[in-house]
Amino acid sequence: MNTNTERLHRPVLVLNASYEPINICAARRAVVLVLKGVAHAEEHAQGHFHSQRTTMPLPSVIRLLEYRRIPHQTRALSRKNIMMRDRYTCQYCAKVFNAGELTLDHVIPRSRSGETSWENLVACCHHCNNKKGNRTPEEANMKLLHPPRPFSLHTGRHLMRLLGRGDEQWRKYLFY
């Protein structure tokens, strides 16, 4: 991946017109929102976005120009969202891995009528998944780090705070 492509994948904090943090998006999406006149860049990251006709500083924080009422959001059940919820941490051995080194584990195995749901899926490393096999955690003598829960507004805000720890420019917007 070249550096321009990497820059376009970096996270950008999205604020509502009221400066309330509402989301995180990729820099590519943030640039599009700024160019369309839907958002304004409040903070900039190092580096620039270059196109054939323009060069602009990469945003780190953007603010929507019109207030958007944000309905109670539910996140789609997906591998990516499970990994984010579990912070890329195996829920059995507590080690942090890259997404490619993790699998999804059904706490109650599917062969035993375990559902594919927020409450039954966890991030799990290959070693622990093989060790657990087709058993429940109790049967495999393994303990879950945290009981799996749906991705909630609280989870999303917690992730924003975690990402904000590494970005000085985000901190002043993540006051809650």
Image: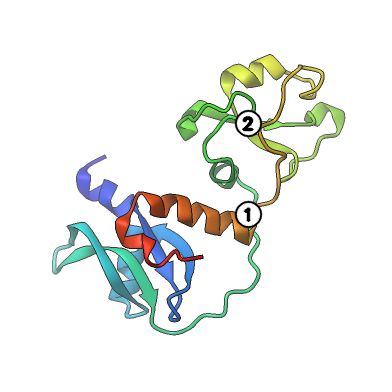
The answer to which of marks 1 and 2 sits earlier in the sequence is 1
Using the image, determine if residue 172 lies above or below residue 84. Answer: below
- Between label 1 and label 2, give the one nearer the viewer: 2
Query: What colour-coding does the image apply?
Result: rainbow
Residue 137 location (% of width, % of height) = 76, 24
Kindly identify which residue carries mark 2.
91
Using the image, determine if residue 20 lies above or below residue 3. Answer: below
Kindly identify which residue carries mark 1.
76
In the image: residue 47, left or right of residue 10:
left
Residue 7 location (% of width, % of height) = 26, 51
Disc 1, SS: loop
Residue drawn at point x = 35 percent, y = 49 percent: 166
The quadrant of the image that shows the N terminus is top left
Residue 43 location (% of width, % of height) = 27, 67
Residue 105 location (% of width, % of height) = 67, 30
State whether residue 142 appears in this view.
Answer: yes
State whether residue 28 appears in this view.
Answer: no
Mark 2: amino acid: Gln
Residue drawn at point x = 22 percent, y = 42 percent: 2
Mark 1: few/some/many CA within 10 Å (<14, 14-19, 20+): few
Using the image, determine if residue 30 lies above or below residue 107. Answer: below
Disc 2, SS: loop
In the image: residue 37, left or right of residue 161:
left
Q: Residue reaching furthest bottom?
A: 66
Residue drawn at point x = 44 percent, y = 60 percent: 24
Specify the label residue 149 is tagged with: none
Q: CA distance from mark 1 to mark 2?
A: 20 Å
Using the image, determine if residue 134 lies above or below residue 5. Answer: above
Mark 1: amino acid: Ala
In the image: residue 122, left or right of residue 139:
left
Q: Quadrant of residue 56?
A: bottom left
In the image: residue 35, left or right of residue 126:
left
